[in-house]
Image (tube, coloured by chain):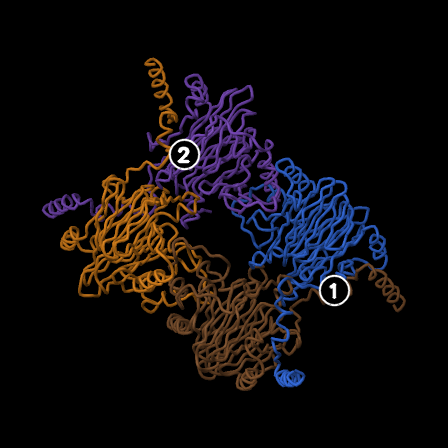
Chain colours: A orange, B brown, C blue, D purple
């Protein structure tokens, strides 16, 4: 046995010199029966983070930082700027009067507003003023900048597909030649032009992302209520919505799926798992999520993450609303996504 | 020459006995250089029709008629229940307390409300209360009924693809076993569940039509205003919108395209033609449409029709809003649709 | 009752003056429970037709006729150049040395070769030489001409969507400025470039029709045999294939579906019906088709038609191969197509 | 400055305790102007590797190894079983009489045959016998096994999307309960059933991969010749084909794009780059590829890799044929793929 090992090791060394390695030594680590991931369940409590975020505002300007963001790093993958294997998340602070200068990149970004009123995101010549619970997108390769014309700080969660783009070696980025893009259309206009299921007759989508770039919370919340009136909650999900690109019925962004769900007071979901590791933001209420032996307690503004294929249950205290995002559109486009419910 | 004719005629008789005919005698009538149509430009003035519509209400009940509708027949094709070659249009009256009983058919139908408030259409277990300018659909093979719980008559325009379905020999219909379907969802709910670009996460479209079945005028009109603020009017169309199925970005119905356009006061469009004969309903304002030597004057509630490939211009008096519908989705799905603008 | 009739008739006259008519008098003829069609089952026996087709060759030249075709007219719709409500069929003769001059039109055409070897169809700068059983397409708005460089007559069946295009008022046509188009690519090349499931890397489909424009019988027949080896015959269809556009998996043409089926010797199918009236061409063998009380006997080269929703069975004598075509792609794109099998 | 650094570092330590990190310290490494990759250009010369591959055959059996493969590791990413960031490649040996036992996994695999005749791959109840130049796929989650009934070793290149699946945490795998799957269909049948642009009429694709699972070299080579006859070579690519799924016109596999290109003798391509790092296998001929200052000489059976966005030229000695694969379908589905040609 020992001798065989030695022979093999000697062979491995020789093939190694030719940039080769034996598959049989690593096959079961590469092609696993179920996902084997460094991603750990984790929660970030906003009341603990908020002072640190505000302190960041005193340490560096938005202009110097380009984006003043504290990355939320998965505890199982520290130092890699990832909250899951394919996704990045961070909390961005923009102070009154500040500007986050215009740039564009192939990475798609979502913003989910945590606190503050009146800061804006500008995309493709149009500004949208943001409020808590608003879901804002800056699609791949669109110019975008942010500013805060209000008198209070604004904090939002950034979600990007940075690790996915890195894995594809497809990162392209460009700074604008001006700090802020020219605004060529009325503020908040895209929602009215594209959010009412009527499109300009000759308009054709220029990309794969939704032409709506701000899904305001007031509309989303109203939709949750309509769903609640129309049907019983799903045992595993409560009432759950998917943000949609009305130009094709697909997800709002091609690489990141986004969801909003309502759990009635006291609701405990049935166990559920899916192959897309998911980041949750608590919008309203409080409760906890159980993943195996791990219990993640949460309340409004907290962020937590559930790994791929980890069976979990949510338990709402008072009525709760959860925003979430994952790489589900990528997995579905490639024929890989799975889910499992346990009654 | 005469002899040849005679020879040929004798041949035609002999092949005729075998259910055959010579193509060369009819080829240029079958495959024409441009559309050669019996469809004529025409206008129906609502102020002339309204007394007749109301008189119909005294002649026959909705129940006896099943649908109390006066068909708008193209003057070039009388007796054929067609407003264009592929489309049917009629004006339907429903009186207070009346019911148009539940049935379903493969023909797709649109309703565009002309006058009245408070009557309803029920589709798939849900009622929507209708108001002027609302665009309501009853998709192919969906149960639908109408009722009027208000204290005034309601009149709407019905648009159906009856001639198309007839040409395909694909008509199927079924009466319901009850006059009115059971209402299982809150009134007006579909718009909130599907009209805000968020869908229930596990919902999948059951057909090709929009899950929104009432596009209320208040939202459509607001969208026209947003378009007006965002861009200049198109020289041939003014500001023109297309009603969209947000589940796939296609038209709201697979066989009938629907549009809403705004012409500012005094606006005269450039000449335009397209291969889809189009039925217009005047929602607001007045003006006229010129098609060759024909001038069709119109004001609110009038209906007029422009034949396929007929170059035309619209001239608005005061600001005008036009609803229109055609078979454009069919032509586009089959790769046939054309349009032409003249500067 | 009489009086009411009279009142109503008087009303109908008055609304008639306004181009209106009462729906309730015609509703059940417009929206029928099942298809109600003038299309009749019918068969054309090639041995009876062939002398007449050849006689046509002495009466008129291909050049004078533009296309020397005997239209197959459904006996239920004589004088309308239709074999079903939406489709046209005819038998075309081209004699040695003749040319059918180049033109293009929005109508899509298929050719299914009945007899002869060595005539060609040219489409988009490429010629394909045709043999019996070959299925050749000339997609909408493509230049095409035919010629016969062989020393024997060739006869093929033409199938076009003429009635559909007429109903849509979407006929456009154009003669070429030369009798024959310039041939810019090697003969028979398209099949090799597009028929092997490899495409030029930067090629994009210019229309909705297949880039393969000749599906030779030798390949199609081989595919039938492969299907026979792989699975049992379908009780209602035998082994049945659908001609496919490999650029999108759809039918070979957007408006006309085409099929090839193999019935083993003595096979009797279970009853079957579908909402697409279907034209059959017998390629090999003989047998009969029963539609209600009607029995249509057929042998090689015969053409027969089964109306929409008419339940029918096929009974093969010796092994038989049937080519067929219908408007099924249109019905499927519009969500209308139905089929029913009876065990 | 130093003090600020210190302050910041102290802050970073404090936020690190909360699983947070400052974006501004890493932003330009995460979102790069152009792809910044550890992937290096590299070539593996088959004449050097072949003795080692054969030696592997004496060290371990296919049964013990499950798959006896020598992984080709990119020299810039040793120890990670990757040839590019998203793709895995290896050379698999199967000796006469051996079996590579049946299993299935979510990873998609391609085989490109380097040497040997007569070994088979079985997928979904059907075997295909393989020859040099054949391109064989085992789609995601399909049972597959390999065997060699010939009297000579067979070597093929395996290409899989292992790193992509790992990044998505979407690996699922399952061994079969028998070493070899039951063969339920005739050998080589899929190509005839699905490769001739006719499909069984009721067949519907069960996944996103091509129903053809062996694209034999004899057909692919013939297609290259047809392209050569029809058009001039592209200055940057020669004559280049894309393997196609005829059920939808997409790539043969949803995650891996595959190509075959012909460079005439002495042809030197113009510089070209694209955002998909690409693995090449030399099928015929010899030549070299220049990437910046790096020159990769190659001859038949060699494998080489070009990183993402690396401008390169190919120079053929005698006429050469190159097979290649990359993650281009993923990038295109997500709207990320770019290419650039320099005249």
Q: CA distance from mark 2 to mark 1?
A: 61 Å
Residue B92: x and y in percent read 54, 77
Q: Residue at x 58, y 36 (%)?
A: D221
Residue B67: x and y in percent read 56, 74
Q: Is residue D179 above or below residue C38?
A: above
Circle 1 — which element?
helix
Q: Tell which subunit mark 2 falls on.
A: D
Q: Which label sits on residue C183?
A: none
Left or right? Give the position of C172 relative to D152: right
- Please name whichever residue, B21 or A269, is drawn nearer the observer in this view of the structure: A269
- Please name whichever residue, B200 or A97, is drawn nearer the observer in this view of the structure: B200
Q: Which residue is mark 1?
A: C77
How packed mark 1 is, by other alpha carbons closer than 10 Å (few <14, some 14-19, many 20 or more), is some
Taking the view exactly as shown, the residue that stands out farthest to the right is B3
Left or right? Give the position of C337 relative to C127: left
Occupied quadrant, residue B327: bottom right
Residue A91: x and y in percent read 23, 52
Q: Which residue is mark 2?
A: D173
- Please name whichever residue, D327 or A261, is drawn nearer the observer in this view of the structure: A261
Taking the view exactly as shown, the residue that stands out farthest to the top is A3
- Please name whichever residue, A334 or D337, is drawn nearer the observer in this view of the structure: A334
Q: Residue at x 45, y 59 (%)?
A: B247
């Amino acid at each position: 046995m020992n001798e065989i090992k030695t022979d093999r090791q000697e062979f491995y060394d020789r093939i190694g010199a030719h940039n080769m390695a034996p598959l049989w030594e690593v096959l079961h680590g590469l092609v696993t029966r179920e996902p084997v991931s460094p991603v750990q369940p984790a929660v970030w409590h906003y009341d603990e983070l908020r002072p640190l975020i505000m302190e960041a505002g005193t340490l560096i300007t938005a202009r110097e930082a380009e984006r003043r963001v504290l990355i939320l790093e998965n505890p199982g993958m520290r130092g890699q700027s990832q909250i899951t294997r394919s996704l990045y998340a961070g909390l961005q602070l923009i102070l009154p009067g500040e500007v986050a200068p215009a740039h564009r990149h192939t990475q798609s970004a979502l913003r989910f507003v945590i606190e503050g009123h009146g800061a804006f995101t500008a995309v493709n010549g149009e500004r949208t003023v943001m409020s808590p619970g608003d879901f804002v997108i800056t699609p791949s390769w669109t110019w975008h900048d942010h500013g805060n014309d209000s008198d209070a700080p604004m904090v939002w969660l950034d979600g990007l597909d940075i690790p996915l783009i890195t894995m594809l070696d497809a990162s392209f980025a460009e700074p604008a030649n001006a700090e802020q893009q020219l605004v060529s259309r009325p503020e908040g206009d895209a929602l009215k032009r594209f959010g009412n299921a009527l499109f300009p007759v000759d308009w054709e989508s220029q990309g794969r992302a939704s032409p709506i770039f701000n899904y305001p919370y007031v509309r989303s919340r109203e939709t949750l209520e309509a769903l609640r009136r129309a049907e019983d909650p799903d045992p595993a999900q409560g009432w759950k919505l998917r943000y949609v690109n009305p130009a094709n019925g697909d997800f709002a962004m091609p690489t990141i799926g986004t969801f909003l769900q309502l759990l009635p007071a006291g609701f405990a979901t049935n166990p559920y798992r899916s192959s897309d590791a998911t980041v949750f933001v608590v919008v309203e209420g409080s409760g906890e999520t159980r993943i195996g032996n791990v219990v993640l307690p949460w309340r409004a503004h907290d962020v937590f993450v559930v790994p791929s294929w980890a069976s979990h249950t949510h338990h709402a205290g008072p009525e709760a609303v959860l925003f979430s995002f994952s790489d589900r559109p990528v997995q579905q486009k490639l024929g890989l996504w799975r889910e499992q419910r346990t009654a």
